[in-house]
Image (cartoon, helix red, strand yellow):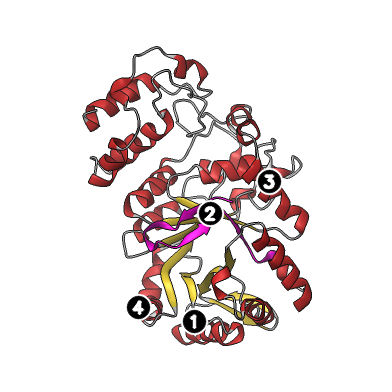
Amino acid sequence: MNYRKLGKSGILVSEIALGCAAFHGLTQDETDAFLDYAIGNGINCMDMYTPDPDIHARIGAYLRGRREKLVVQAHFCTAWRDGQYVVVRGLDDVRKSFELMLDNSRLGFVDVGMIHYVDSMETWRQLIDNGVVDYALRCREEGLIRAFGISSHNPDVARQLVHQGVEVLMFSINPCYDLMPSSVDIYAMAERSSYEGSALCLDPSRQGLYEECLQLGVGITVMKTFAGGSLLDVRKSPVDRTLTPVQCIHYALTRPAVSCIMAGARSREELDACLAYETAAEADRDYAVAFADFPRIDWSGRCLYCGHCAPCPKHIDVAMVTKLLNLTIAQNGAAETERGHYAALDAHAGDCIGCGACEKRCPFSVPVMKNMRLAAQTFGL
């Protein structure tokens, strides 16, 4: 298992993390066995968005005496009513639900406390006005959470919020959703009708969000890596094509600032399909050829950091140079962080000899040599 820092929080997480879908209706023994299996395979992080008190109690019981085994991401603004999950926004409801989660689980603290489902600035202003944001920040000051986060599906909203003290962003990332503008809500993203008509291309707001998170040190935890499973089933796929779990995971993990994907596995078999990523060959991780076969979608000129440009005869990490260049363009100039990362590379864009081998291999007709010239000019190397 590979581990990554969760942005500026410094928390180290396994790149394959665990959702809580598998835990509904399990006994304590079954919960223990599933967690033993996940942790035994290197997973050290879990998203506990559910407000189900029974799940809280079982997970807490498992972690008693071994709290350090699992980085727990939990959510403000969810509550359990009449056996159902509901979203709440009032301060009293939020406080009661969060404190109940801590009491039931007896965790003492959670590593990431995340304000749940902020898809509009109106919702964010409401949460500021009614004191929910202040409450979450107080929880951090008091040690009840180690890092402050939000979850969102809207790139325009998320781009504003990551500039407001957010340390962790939970965001829906997969190659279909990344085609959708922010005007399309999360429910419509799974509908085939949203992908019909004129040719689609990568949404610049989403790409900009990932690049800004990298620049700001905001770690991204990924939800909906498989688009609710639809990308794995041609009967449900909104683009009439399928990808493997490994390809979907590789796409998400190669986006800037992404630290881990939350695997919503409901069984050991589904979890194994995600864990297979860690030992998969590069050819099995490769999503580029599959993307090129997506109908009605124009990937032309967009670097997806797929790595098909390699190997470079001058040993330039073309994908990384392009990623740092795109980040610099997004923020209208190279910050010291980007200059430092660029300078530390073994070879630089200025070493490019213009042989064009990378462009011939690129499935998406990216003007690599032009980008190398621009990077050399931008970074001075």
| Number of disc labels | 4
Query: Circle 1 is placed at which residue position?
Result: 94
Q: Earlier in the sequence, mark 2 or mark 4?
A: 4
Residue at 39 percent across and 26 percent down: it is 316
Dot 3 alpha-carbon crowd within 10 angstroms: few under 14, some 14 to 19, many 20 or more: few
Q: Earlier in the sequence, mark 4 or mark 3?
A: 4
Report the amino acid beneath label 2. Cys
Give the residue drawn at x 48%, y 24%.
309
Q: CA distance from mark 3 to mark 1?
A: 38 Å
Q: Looking at the image, can residue 192 be seen?
A: no
What number is the disc on residue 276?
Answer: 3
Q: Is residue 236 left or right of residue 17?
A: right
Report x, y in % for residue 299: 51, 29
Q: Secondary structure at mark 4?
A: helix
Amino acid on which disc 3 is placed: Ala
Do the CB atoms of the residues marked 1 and 4 lie less than 8 Å apart?
no
Quarter of the view holding residue 211: top left
Viewer-nearest of discs 2 and 1: 2
The C terminus: image quadrant: top left
Q: Circle 4 is placed at which residue position? A: 129
Whether residue 93 is in magenta: the answer is no
N-terminal label among 3 and 2:
2
Q: Is residue 186 above or below residue 293?
A: below
Labelled pair 2, 1 in contact (Cβ < 8 Å): no
Q: Is residue 228 visible?
A: yes
Check contact, mark 3 vs mark 1: CB within 8 A: no
**Label 4, label 3: how many angstroms apart (C-alpha)?**
45 Å
Q: Which residue is mark 2?
A: 260
